Amino acid sequence: MTPSSPARPRRPRVVLSVAVSLDGYIDDAGPERLKLSDAADFDRVDQVRADSDAILVGAQTLRRDNPRLLVNSAERRAARVAAGKPEFPLKVTITATGELDPAWRFWQHGGDKLVYTTDHGAARLGDRLAGLAEVVGLGPEVELEALLDDLGRRGIGQLMVEGGTRIHTGFLAADLADELHVSVAPILVGDSAAPRFVDPAAFPGAPHRRLRLTGLERVGDMAVLRYTR
């Protein structure tokens, strides 16, 4: 009798969250981060973070923006604790090279942190993040499917992905995003050197596949659109 293979862990629900300008940019080309969201939209994002079990950003976003990536509302953090959850969602980043600075604010605030990298990146990191984050090598490449399987084994039910461009492109090209939140700011950037929401890629079904618009909401001066596959 052939033994059955172990069941694949249930992957988390993946929610991509992005703020874009009217012409599709997520930042300008200047050294300082362009804040596209207004106060009301930042508060909305804070609620989505509080509703999630983990939040993921790429290493390039850490280098460019040096974010803390927290649930800022004390009331929302208290509600998480009352529900038996950690005060803060797990914070996750991806790096192929292992080039991460332990002085970044990402490591210094909030709860547990997790780094997914290549085996080469893990060796390069060594013990640089000891006491700050768990480092997981996923092989010669960081495959998003393997990343989601590992998060599933850790009991992560919802993963919020906040960018940047390469990360959003990767999840969408692999058809791994269950829901997409696009917050559109009444701003025009108009700079070809600025980063866009996604890079060119072989998106499943493109250009004929249409996502389902499941929500349209005015938040402050932003238009928030929600799509599912």
Image (spheres, grey):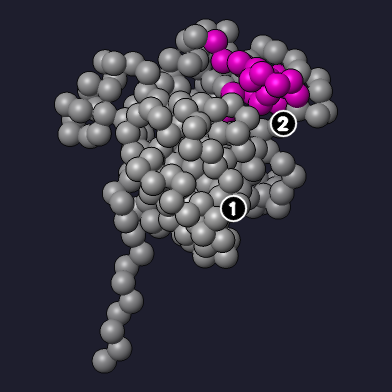
Q: Does residue 158 sit above or below 78 in this rendering?
A: below
Does 137 sit left or right of 60 as displayed?
A: left
| Residue 172 in sight from this viewpoint | no
| Residue 217: image tag | none
Q: Secondary structure at mark 2?
A: loop
Does 148 sit left or right of 118 as displayed?
A: left
In magenta stretch: residue 217: no
The part of the image, by quadrant, that contains residue 44 is: top left
The part of the image, by quadrant, that contains residue 50 is: top left
The one of 26 and 208 positioned closer to us in this rendering: 26
Name which residue type carries label 2: Pro
Residue 76 place in picture, x, y as percent: 29, 20
Residue 73 place in picture, x, y as percent: 33, 16
Q: Residues within 10 Å of mark 1 (few under 14, many from 20)?
A: some
Q: Residue at x 49, y 9 (%)?
A: 39
Q: Does residue 22 sit above or below 105 in this rendering?
A: above
The one of 68 and 180 positioned closer to us in this rendering: 68
Q: Residue at x 75, y 24 (%)?
A: 29
Does 163 sit left or right of 132 as displayed?
A: right
Q: Residue at x 33, y 45 (%)?
A: 156
In this figure, which residue is indicated by the disc labeled 1?
96
Please, which residue is most extreme toward the front here? 127
Name which residue type carries label 1: Ala
Q: Which residues are the magenta region? A: 18-38
In this figure, which residue is indicated by the disc labeled 2?
195
Residue 201 place in picture, x, y as percent: 71, 49
